[in-house]
Amino acid sequence: MSGPSTYVPKSALGRWFESRLPIGGLIHSSFVVYPTPKNLNYFWAFGGILSLMLVAQIITGVVLAMHYTPEATMAFSSVENIMRNVNYGWLLRYLHANGASMFFFAVYVHIFRGMFYGSYKAPREVLWILGVIIFLLMMATAFMGYVLPWGQMSFWGATVITNLFSALPGIGEPIVTWLWGGYSVDNPTLNRFFALHYLLPFMIVGVVILHVWALHVTGQNNPAGVEVKSVERDTVPFTPYATIKDAFAMVVFLILYSWFVFYVPNYLGDADNYIVANPLVTPAHIVPEWYFLPFYAILRSIPSKLGGVIAMFGSIAILAFLPWLDTSKIRSGRFRPLFQIFFFGFVIAAMGLGYLGSKPPEGAYVIAGRLLSVYYFAYFLVILPLLGLFETPRTLPATIADDVLAKGGSAILAGAAQAPSTKG
Ligand code: HEM
């Protein structure tokens, strides 16, 4: 059934090409016969959804760039021109802007999935760290992309965030001047952000290729967190099983994406960004896009600027150390009762920080932000290291096939096709 590739192209031309560049065999072994754990749930569809979104962002972005002008006096009006005069320009722009939100939504589900099922644990540490690098590149890309329409929030968001580097003692100010290409956010800043916003997605593609390569070396984790013991009993071939399931999940995801694009295209945006950038007028509240809000809240919950900057970058960097901070021998959160409580606490803390990031930094919001930031870091630095030492896990299924059977799957589903089915 599934196993290593035995791919031989049908046509003579195909065989000629394959013996010179075996790309067909690579695709066949990675996406056709590739053994996929048979107990995967829909959370495992998000890697495919992310790949789709990456391609969608690149295609819409390249076409937008054909009509956009990266120059401070023209950027804003070139975007308005795209919206009003370019054929389907409004669609391209709404797809790209809402696509960024959908991309982040999918990546957060993907990351939380990995955190719950322990997908970062050995032997998948490198796969996980490559994911963290992708996440950083995505954040840099989105941040610079948001500056391009050159609205008020573009300008002031860029000013606030680049200014953070000035907190570094001694070297801070020169670094900020170097980043700006001058003494304030201005045309040189816009130009370089455009160049980098075009470049970084292709770097993301490169790291995604490494990410998927690493995945195919270790094989996928699964909801039970036990490794594949028998390819025959525990896995099914990627095609058609995972291909169809992923395709279905993509369609559902695209419906949600379309709903934003066609019904509420500006819901996730900020009205201030429809006002052209003005260095002399500061908006009342400078708020980043929703997907940055938890980190923004962490930044603002530390009273010192340098401390806030360290905490904010630290809150992302700490993800890379997760494989070593979690001391539990059990991979999947399904079998860790105490972990489940703290994990859901973490999800709520992250969402709470997101909410607080959108509020002005005053009064009870600040106190709540501090408490949730403490929980955020304690989860990684205290709870996970200790939990692995004290927690009594539930009994694991011996194999993936047993896990399917325990959930009421028939013997045939579990791969024991020869045995008579228990369900008739
Ligand atoms: C552009 C962004 C990304 C793309 C296109 C992508 C793609 C994929 C794909 C196709 C898979 C296999 C299918 C699946 O398990 O969902 C996967 C698995 C995985 N990804 Fe990503 N990924 C991205 C970002 C990330 C990030 C940011 C992280 C973590 C910080 C991450 C961590 C993982 C892990 C640990 C797995 C293995 C999951 C398992 O087998 O249980 N990925 N990724």
Image: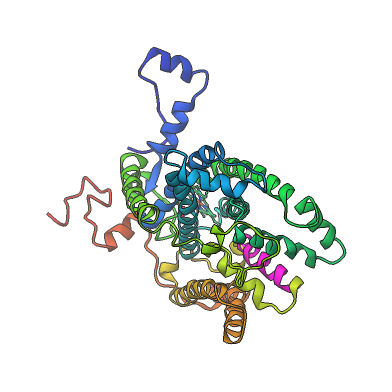
What is the x, y in percent for residue 206? Answer: 59, 40
Measured along the vertical axis of the image, is residue 219 above or below residue 329?
above
What is the x, y in percent for residue 300? Answer: 65, 74
Q: Which is nearer the eye, 416 or 255?
A: 255
The answer to whether any part of residue 122 appears in the image is yes
Quadrant containing the N terminus in the rendered view: top left
Residue 311 lies in the magenta-colored region: yes
Q: Which is nearer the eye, 366 or 94?
A: 94
Residue 84 lies in the magenta-colored region: no
The magenta stretch is 307-321
Quadrant containing the C terminus in the rendered view: bottom left
Q: Is residue 229 left or right of residue 218?
A: left
Choose top left, top right, bottom left or bottom right for residue 8: top left
Main SS, magenta region, reads helix
Residue at 62%, 59% (x, y): give it: 320
Residue at 15%, 57% (x, y): give it: 423
Q: Is residue 216 left or right of residue 165?
A: left
